[in-house]
Image (spheres, helix red, strand yellow):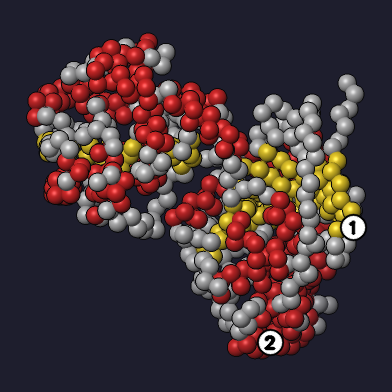
C-alpha cells in the first residue's frame, strides 16, 4: 500500500474554525512564513485542552520526496497548523526566488521548548525513540511525567499499529506530543490523530531531534549550521544511510526550484476601474504592494481606465517600476465601469479576482484575510466592509453621509450571507445591496458576470440562487476616501436612490421572487409617503427635513425597481494580439514590463485596437 493511500484512509473533512496562518507554496510544498518568536508565542498560548493539531518542519528531503511522489502527501502539510522551513538551503533558494522563508528547525524548536517552555512537572507524550533515549531526555531536563510509546518498525503500513499509536495519544492528553518516528510516518500519524477528533494538545513532528538532545547523534557545530553545511556533517556521521539523500536526491531541489520559477503564477489579480481619479492611485499601489502573507509575484494590479483621455496612464506607469507587485494598465474608451471591470477580469492572470474601487485603501492583511475565509469556509465569493474616510468632516448631515457611503453587515466572519429581504432589519443580510466594492472570488465564478454584464447586486443574487456561497469577512476592511466635492445633498440623495433601486431590483434576478418584490414596493410606498411629509419640515429643521428627503429618495428608488434589475449589454469581444518582445529600459529587473493596452470599442464590435508602449524619455 502506498503512503498516499494510507494518508487517504483518514477522513479529511475540514471543519470551520479558527483560521490558520496562511501558507504559501514554494517548490510545490506549503510553507508558513513565520519566525521562531511567532511560533513560540503561539505555542505558549496552547493549553492541554485544545483540540489536537500538529506542526510539520519540511526540509530538502521532504520537498524532493513530495516532488518525486507527485504531491501524494502534500495535503498533510496543507492541513498542518504550521509548516515551518527546516532547511537553510531551502530558505536560501527561496530568497533568490523572491520568497521569504524564515528558518525554524525542528531541533532548535524542540530544544527551546524543553529548556524554557515545558515545566518539569508537566506531562509530555513521546511517540517513537527507545526507552534509553527517553530516560536520557528525562535526566537532562528533569522531566517527571513522560508518557512513551514506541511503535514497531514499519508500523505506518499496519492500520492496527497506527490506531494503537493514535489511541495512546488520546489516552494520555498532553500539551505537547513529540512524534519522532521519522518522515513521512510521523506526519501521516499526526494527521490520523487530528482527524479522529478525540485527542488534545499539539503534535510536533521532530524526527531525529530527540537523538541530538540526548547525544546519541552529534549536531553540526554552529559555524557549519550558519554556513549551510549541516548536511555535510550529517553525511559524515552516517554515510551509509545518508549518502543517497544528500548526494543523489538533494541536488534535485535546484531543478524543482527552477521549475517553480518558470511556472510561478499570479494568485490574486486586484481589479481597479478608474476614471479621472488618478491622484488617489499612488497610495492604492503602495497599499496593495504591502499586503502580508504574499511574495511579490503572487499579486498583480490591473487598472482599467475608462476615461476618454486615459488620464491614469502616466501615474500608473511611473509607479509600476517602484512597486513590488506586477502592474498592468488597460484603457478602453466609451464604456462604463461595469463593462470596464469585466474587460479587466477577462485579461487578469490571477486565479482569484479581488475588486476594489480607485478611491479605496486596503488594510495590510486585506487579501490574506479574504483568502483565509475562502479556504476555511469554502466560500465562492468573499465580501468585506467598506468604511468611509472623509477628506473633510461633513459640516452637516454627517450620519446620513456615513450611512450612504459605508458598506457594512451585522454578520460575523464566516457567516453565509443572503440578500436582504423586506422587513429584515437585523440578521445575515447586508444593510446595502451586495456589491463588488470589496470582494474576492475565483476567476471562474466571474465568467457569468462578464458575459451577462449585470450590475453587482443582480449578479451576486444570481450566484446565491444558483447555490453559490457568499461569505462575510469582517477583518478584510478597506477605507474609501470621500472627497469634499461628494459631500453635497444631491449626491447623497442620488446614492440613496440608487441603493434602494438595487435592493428592490434584485428581487427580479433570475429566478425572480415576486413576493419580495411586492414587499419592497409596499415599503417604498410607505417611505415615499412618510418621507414627503417629513420633508415639509425642512424650513423648520434642516436635519429632520434631510431625514425626510432621505426616506423619500429610498422609497422612490424601490418604486423604480426596474432600473435595478436589468442586465447591461455584454462587453464587445476584444482579441489581444501580443506584440513582438522588445527590451524595455524603464522596467525594473525581474519585473514584468508594463504593457499599455488601448482598446476602442463601439456599441456592438471593436472598431479599432492597437498596442502602444511609451517611448523611453531621453536622459
Residue toward you, 297 or 53? 297
Residue at 83% x, 60% y is 335
Q: Badge 1: few (under 14), some or many (20 or more) residues near its Cα, within 10 Å? A: few
Tag count: 2
Measured Cα–Cα span from mark 2 to mark 1: 43 Å
Residue 166 in the image: above or below residue 514: above
Residue where numbered disc 2 is placed:
521
Residue at 52% x, 40% y is 293
Residue at 9% x, 25% y is 132
Q: Nearer the viewer, mark 2 or mark 1?
A: 1
Residue 10 in the image: above or below residue 298: below
Residue 425 in the image: above or below residue 608: below
x and y percentages locating residue 93 in the rendered image? 50, 25
State which quadrant residue 153 falls in: top left
Mark drawn on residue 81: none
Residue toward you, 75 or 141? 75
x and y percentages locating residue 368 in the rendered image? 53, 47
Please indicate whether residue 397 sits to the left or right of residue 146 in the image: right
x and y percentages locating residue 558 in the rendered image? 71, 81
Residue at 24% x, 54% y is 196
Residue toward you, 6 or 125? 6
x and y percentages locating residue 449 in the rendered image? 67, 65
Tag 1's secondary structure?
strand
Q: Are marks 2 and 1 in contact (CB under 8 Å)?
A: no
Which badge, 2 or 1, is on the more N-terminal residue? Answer: 2
Residue 19 in the image: above or below residue 504: above
Please indicate whether residue 584 sits to the left or right of residue 246 in the image: right
Residue where numbered disc 1 is placed:
607
Amino acid at each position: 500500500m502506498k503512503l498516499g493511500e494510507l494518508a487517504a484512509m483518514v477522513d479529511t473533512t475540514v471543519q470551520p474554525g479558527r483560521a490558520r496562518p496562511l501558507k504559501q507554496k514554494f517548490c510545490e510544498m506549503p510553507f508558513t512564513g513565520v519566525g521562531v518568536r511567532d511560533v513560540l508565542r503561539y505555542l505558549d498560548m496552547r493549553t492541554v485542552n485544545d483540540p489536537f493539531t500538529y506542526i510539520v518542519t519540511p526540509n530538502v528531503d521532504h520537498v524532493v520526496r513530495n516532488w518525486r511522489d507527485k504531491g501524494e502527501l502534500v495535503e498533510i502539510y496543507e492541513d498542518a497548523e504550521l509548516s515551518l522551513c527546516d532547511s537553510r538551503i531551502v530558505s536560501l533558494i527561496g530568497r533568490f526566488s523572491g520568497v521569504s522563508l524564515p528558518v525554524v528547525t525542528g531541533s532548535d524548536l524542540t530544544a527551546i521548548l524543553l529548556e524554557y517552555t515545558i515545566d518539569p512537572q508537566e506531562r509530555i507524550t513521546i511517540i517513537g525513540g527507545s526507552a534509553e533515549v527517553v530516560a536520557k531526555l528525562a535526566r537532562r531536563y528533569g522531566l517527571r511525567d513522560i508518557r512513551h510509546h514506541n511503535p514497531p518498525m514499519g508500523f505506518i503500513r499496519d492500520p492496527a499499529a497506527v490506531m494503537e499509536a493514535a489511541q495512546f495519544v488520546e489516552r494520555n492528553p498532553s500539551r505537547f506530543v513529540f512524534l519522532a518516528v521519522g518522515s513521512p510516518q510521523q506526519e501521516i500519524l499526526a494527521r490520523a490523530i487530528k482527524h479522529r477528533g478525540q485527542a488534545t494538545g499539539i503534535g510536533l513532528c521532530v524526527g531525529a531531534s530527540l537523538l541530538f538532545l540526548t547525544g546519541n547523534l552529534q549536531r553540526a557545530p554552529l559555524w557549519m549550521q550558519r554556513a549551510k553545511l549541516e548536511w555535510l556533517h550529517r553525511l559524515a556521521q552516517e554515510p551509509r544511510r545518508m549518502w543517497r539523500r544528500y548526494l543523489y536526491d538533494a541536488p534535485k531541489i535546484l531543478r524543482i526550484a527552477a521549475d517553480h520559477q518558470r511556472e510561478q503564477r499570479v494568485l490574486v489579480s486586484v481589479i481597479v476601474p478608474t476614471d479621472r481619479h488618478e491622484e488617489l492611485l499612488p497610495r492604492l499601489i503602495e497599499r496593495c504592494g504591502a499586503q502580508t502573507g504574499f511574495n511579490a509575484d503572487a499579486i498583480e494590479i490591473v487598472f482599467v481606465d475608462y476615461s476618454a483621455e486615459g488620464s491614469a496612464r502616466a501615474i500608473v506607469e511611473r509607479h509600476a517600476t517602484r512597486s513590488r507587485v506586477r502592474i498592468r494598465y488597460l484603457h478602453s474608451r466609451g464604456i462604463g465601469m461595469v463593462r470596464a471591470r469585466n474587460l479587466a477580469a477577462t485579461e487578469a492572470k490571477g486565479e482569484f479576482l479581488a475588486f476594489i474601487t480607485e478611491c479605496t485603501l486596503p488594510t495590510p492583511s486585506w487579501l490574506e484575510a479574504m483568502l483565509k475565509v475562502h479556504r476555511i469556509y469554502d466560500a465562492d465569493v468573499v465580501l468585506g466592509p467598506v468604511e468611509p474616510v472623509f477628506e473633510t468632516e461633513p459640516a452637516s448631515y454627517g450620519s446620513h453621509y456615513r450611512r450612504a457611503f459605508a458598506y457594512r453587515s451585522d454578520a460575523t466572519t464566516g457567516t453565509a450571507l443572503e440578500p436582504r429581504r423586506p422587513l429584515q432589519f437585523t440578521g445575515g443580510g447586508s444593510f446595502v445591496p451586495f456589491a463588488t466594492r470589496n470582494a474576492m472570488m475565483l476567476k471562474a465564478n466571474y465568467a457569468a458576470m462578464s458575459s451577462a454584464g449585470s450590475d453587482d447586486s443582480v449578479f451576486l443574487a444570481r450566484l446565491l440562487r444558483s447555490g453559490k456561497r457568499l461569505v462575510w469577512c469582517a477583518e478584510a476592511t478597506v477605507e474609501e476616501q470621500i472627497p469634499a466635492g461628494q459631500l453635497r445633498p444631491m449626491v447623497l440623495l442620488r446614492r440613496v436612490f440608487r441603493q434602494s433601486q438595487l435592493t428592490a431590483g434584485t428581487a427580479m434576478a433570475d429566478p425572480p421572487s415576486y413576493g419580495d418584490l411586492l414587499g419592497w414596493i409596499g415599503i417604498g410606498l410607505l417611505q415615499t409617503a412618510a418621507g414627503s411629509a417629513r420633508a415639509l419640515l425642512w424650513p423648520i429643521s434642516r436635519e429632520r427635513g434631510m431625514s425626510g428627503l432621505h426616506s423619500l429618495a429610498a422609497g422612490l428608488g424601490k418604486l423604480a425597481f426596474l432600473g435595478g434589475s436589468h442586465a447591461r449589454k455584454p462587453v464587445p469581444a476584444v482579441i489581444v494580439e501580443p506584440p513582438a518582445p522588445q527590451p524595455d529600459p524603464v522596467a525594473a529587473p525581474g519585473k514584468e514590463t508594463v504593457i499599455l493596452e488601448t482598446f476602442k470599442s463601439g456599441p456592438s464590435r471593436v472598431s479599432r485596437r492597437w498596442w502602444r508602449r511609451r517611448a523611453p524619455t531621453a536622459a
